[in-house]
Image (cartoon, rainbow, N blue to C red):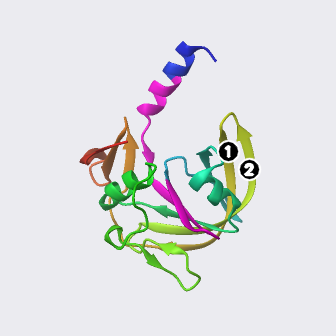
Amino acid sequence: MSVELGDRFKAVFREHPAAVTLLTALTPRGPVGLTASSLASVAADPPAVSFSVTRATGSAGGILAAPELSIHLLGAQHAATALAFSRSGEERFTAAQGWEWDAEGRPVLPDARARLRCRIIDTLRVADSSLVVAEVLDIVIGPPAPPLVYRDRTFHAFDVAAGVLDPTQPQHR
């Protein structure tokens, strides 16, 4: 791909707003997680979603290897947590971020707008990323909150009533 095409591609998707999620999984080494803005619905019966992750190492590798993962759909109040999970070396799964643990020891963010428990059913390698398709095994609906959206390297609260993006705290990644 030419540099010019690559730059235009990045510019287009920088301006494309996307909902923010946290992908988490429990591995033999403990919990792993990362911020993702690529979640999409694939099918309703049976329910399936897709997302992409870059590199199959670190947290992404743990998620790809885990028997199950959770996808937390974030509200505007989670901007700082989303930022922490988007950077290497940041503290994750802290009580201050609101994390709890379910009966199986999986990390749970109880005030997420929703949590999908999933099982990966297919992956497709594309350049340095993996496109993942996952079957949804269970859904927990959380409290209503303005969705957290990522656009132009900034987290925003989506004001559903007004149909507007309002910048949250100035948190860039």
Amino acid residing under circle 2: Thr
User: In the rendering, at what x and y percent does residue 113 appear?
Assistant: 41, 66
User: In the rendering, at what x and y percent does residue 77 appear?
Assistant: 30, 61
Residue 92 position (above or below residue 84): below
Which residue in the protein does label 2 denote? Answer: 123
Residue 54, by quadrant, is top right
Q: Residues within 10 Å of mark 1 (few under 14, many from 20)?
A: some
Asked which secondary structure carries label 2, the reply is strand
Q: Quadrant of the N terminus?
A: top right
- The residue at 68%/65% (across/down) is 66
Q: CA distance from mark 2 to mark 1?
A: 6 Å
Q: Which residue is more in the foreground, 128 or 131?
A: 128
Amino acid residing under circle 1: Ser
**What is the magenta range?**
9-34
- The residue at 43%/48% (across/down) is 87
Left or right of 128 in this view: 82: left
Q: Is residue 42 visible?
A: no
- The residue at 55%/86% (across/down) is 103
Residue 43 position (above or below residue 38): below
- N-terminal label among 2 and 1: 2
Q: Residues within 10 Å of mark 2 (few under 14, many from 20)?
A: some
